[in-house]
Amino acid sequence: MMMSMMGSYGDGNGYVGNINLKEETAHNISFSASFRDPENNAWEVKATPYFSYVENFIDVDRCGTGNANCSVSAAHSFTTQPTNGFYFLSMNNHDARLWGMDLSGRADLYQHRDFGQFAARTIMSYVRGERMDGGNLYHMMPFNAKLSLDHQLDGWKSAVEMQFVDSKTDVQAIRNELTTPSYILLNAKTGYQWKNMSVDVGVDNVLDKQYYHPLAGVYAGDHYAMSISFPDPGFRNNRNLPGMGRSVFVGVTLTY
């Protein structure tokens, strides 16, 4: 029962610890390259690729007859997993490697005394993670990017942002991690700065699009999904947690 209640990662699985875990040791290689307009600083592009080899990366193994950390639950684990897709798992060390790139850029588009300044910004990132003994690492964000059109006029600052997230297909089979489809979100915000006070108003997911964030986990709020020990035969672990719908925020900031 304790393992089924220990949902440490929000994925519906049950977890047990391991007092024999070794500490992680990461060996990292990265560099950055920046390119910009040398005269007017009207544009800039920055790229940072990286690679990391992690000794004793703390990951998980499924409970089974060969896993001493949770051998008591081995039979129960294999009995329940075919009916609902959740597993009992134990923490264990595995060497792993991660690599990816962060890319950012900006450019001034237009400037006028009466209409203000217009600029564009973008941020892109990609990461890939694998265990050295085979299989993908858990909770790896797929390629994602933000493209923003900014405007500034005196104290007014506004932005329209598009957020792109690629489909997630490199998932970890050990946890029965779910795939997610790609999506595009539209966000908008504006704000005014007056002396030591600023007021900001914005709308996220303007088009009220239904989407599933790649790192949100499973929809474990379903009363059948909440129990590994007593699964419903008709339910399987195939429901992603939906992302937030259209939301409005208002903020006031005072500086002194």
Image (tube, grey):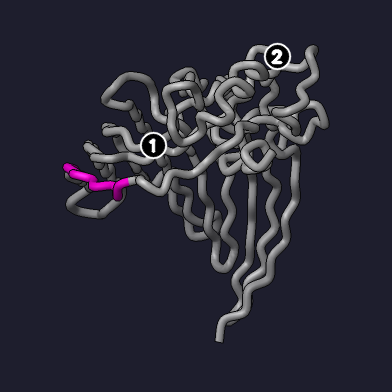
**The label number, if any, that marks residue 48 in the structure image:** none
Residue 70 at x, y percent in the picture: 51, 33
- What is the number of the mark on residue 92? 1
- Which residue corresponds to the image point at 44% horizontal and 38% vertical from the top-left? 91
Q: Which of the 4 image quarters holds residue 124?
A: top left
Q: Quadrant of the N terminus?
A: top right
Start-end of magenta stretch: 22-30
Task: Name above or below for residue 130 compared with residue 156.
Answer: above
Q: In the image, is 147 to the left or to the right of 27?
A: right
Q: Nearer the viewer, residue 160 or 26?
A: 26
Q: Position of residue 214 (x, y in %)?
A: 55, 31
Residue 191 at x, y percent in the picture: 63, 62
- Disc 1 vs disc 2: Cβ atoms closer than 8 Å? no
Tell which of 24 and 205 is nearer to you.
24
Circle 1 SS class = strand
Image coordinates for residue 166, horizontal then vertical, percent:
49, 24
Q: Is residue 137 magenta?
A: no
Q: Is residue 150 toward the left or the right of residue 52 in the image?
A: right
205 to the left or right of 118: right
CA separation in Å, label 1 and label 2:
25 Å
Q: Is residue 99 visible?
A: no
Judge whether 192 appears above or below 65 on screen. Answer: below
Q: What is the chief secondary structure element of the magenta stretch? A: strand
Label at residue 83: 2
Task: Answer whether residue 27 is magenta in the image.
Answer: yes
**Residue at image coords 66%, 36%:** 4
The three-letter amino acid code for the residue at tag 1 is: Asn
**Amino acid at circle 2:** Thr
